[in-house]
Image (cartoon, rainbow, N blue to C red):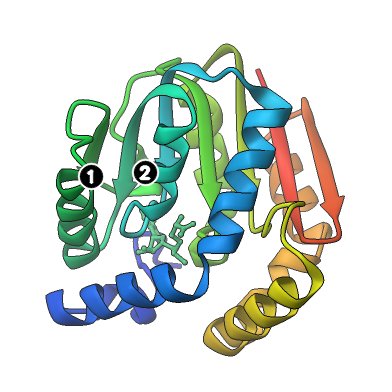
Amino acid sequence: MNEDRVPAQYSEMDLSKAKEFDQKVKKNFMPAIRSTVRQIVEDYGPLRGIGVDVGCGTAVFAIELCKHSDLKIYALEKAKPIYEVARMNIEKEGLKERIIPVLGDANKIPFEDEFADFVISRGAYHCWEDKPKVLKEIYRILKKGGIALVGGGFGRYVNDNELERMRKLRDRSLGEAAKVYSSPGAFQEPLEKAGIRDFRLIRERAGLWTEIRK
Ligand SMILES: C[S@@+](CC[C@H](N)C(=O)[O-])C[C@H]1O[C@@H](n2cnc3c(N)ncnc32)[C@H](O)[C@@H]1O
C-alpha cells in the first residue's frame, strides 16, 4: 500500500485545474461550508488557539472558519497546485496572519505533538489509504483537552433542496469513494485500529462525523 498517494483526482491537477476546482467549490458547496462552520462554532465555540485543517483543499473552509473564530489556522494540503491556490485565496482575503498554508502530508503531519487545540478535516477522509495512520497523526498533534472533527457533513443548516443538490454533485464527483461518508463502520474500525478510545460518531441528516477528544 502506498500511503503517500493522494487520489489522482487531486494529485494530477495542474495550476489551472486547481483554479477550476476552487471555482467549483465556491460555486457549488458554499451552503455546506457556511452551514458546517456555523454548526462547529455553535457546538464547540468560542474557538481560539491553534487550529489545523487536514486536507484543506483551496482553503475555502479554513477561511470561513477563521472568519467565525479566533483560531490561528494551519491549512495542510498535499497537492502543490491546490496548496498554491489556497495561498492565493488566503492572501486575497487578507488573512495571511491568521491562516498559514502548509504543504505536507496527512500521513506525517509536520507539527509537534500536542500542537493544536482544534483539528478539522472535512471531505478528505476518503483520500486516506491508511486511515488509522492519519487518525493517529491527528490524535498525536491534538493538545490535551483538544477536539478533532473528521468527516464529511454538509452541516445541519442546509435546507433539503441544497442538501440533495450538493449530495448528488459530491457523489457524482467521488463515485464509490463517497460511501465512507455514510458508513459508520468506515470510521469506527480505523479509529479502533488507531487505538483511539475517546471518540463519538455523529450521524446527522446532513453527514457523518467523528469527534475525537484527548
Ligand atoms: C475534497 S477536498 C476537501 C477540501 C476541504 N477540506 C473542503 O472541505 O472543502 C480533499 C483534499 O484533501 C487533500 N488530501 C488528500 N490526501 C491528503 C494527504 N495525505 N495529505 C494532505 N492533503 C491531502 C486533497 O489533495 C484535496 O485537496
Task: Give the residue type at disc 2.
Answer: Ile
Q: Amino acid at mark 1?
A: Glu
- From the viewer's perspective, is residue 65 above or below residue 162? above
Q: Position of residue 100 (x, y in %)?
A: 23, 34
The disc at residue 198 is none
Against 91, residue 185 (above or below) is below
Q: Nearer the viewer, residue 107 or 45?
A: 45
User: Label 1: which residue?
Assistant: 93
Which image quarter: residue 49?
Answer: top left
Q: CA distance from mark 2 to mark 1?
A: 8 Å
Q: Which residue is mark 2?
A: 63
Which residue does the image show at 69% across and 40% down from the upper left?
A: 39
Tell me if residue 136 comes above or below residue 204 in the rendering: above
169 is higher (above) or lower (below) than 27:
below
Report the mark closest to the observer, 2 or 1: 1
Mark 1 Cβ inside 8 Å of ligand 1? no
When asked about the image quadrant of residue 64, the answer is top left
Q: How many marks?
A: 2
The mark that comes first in sequence, 2 or 1, is 2
Q: Nearer the viewer, residue 92 or 186?
A: 92
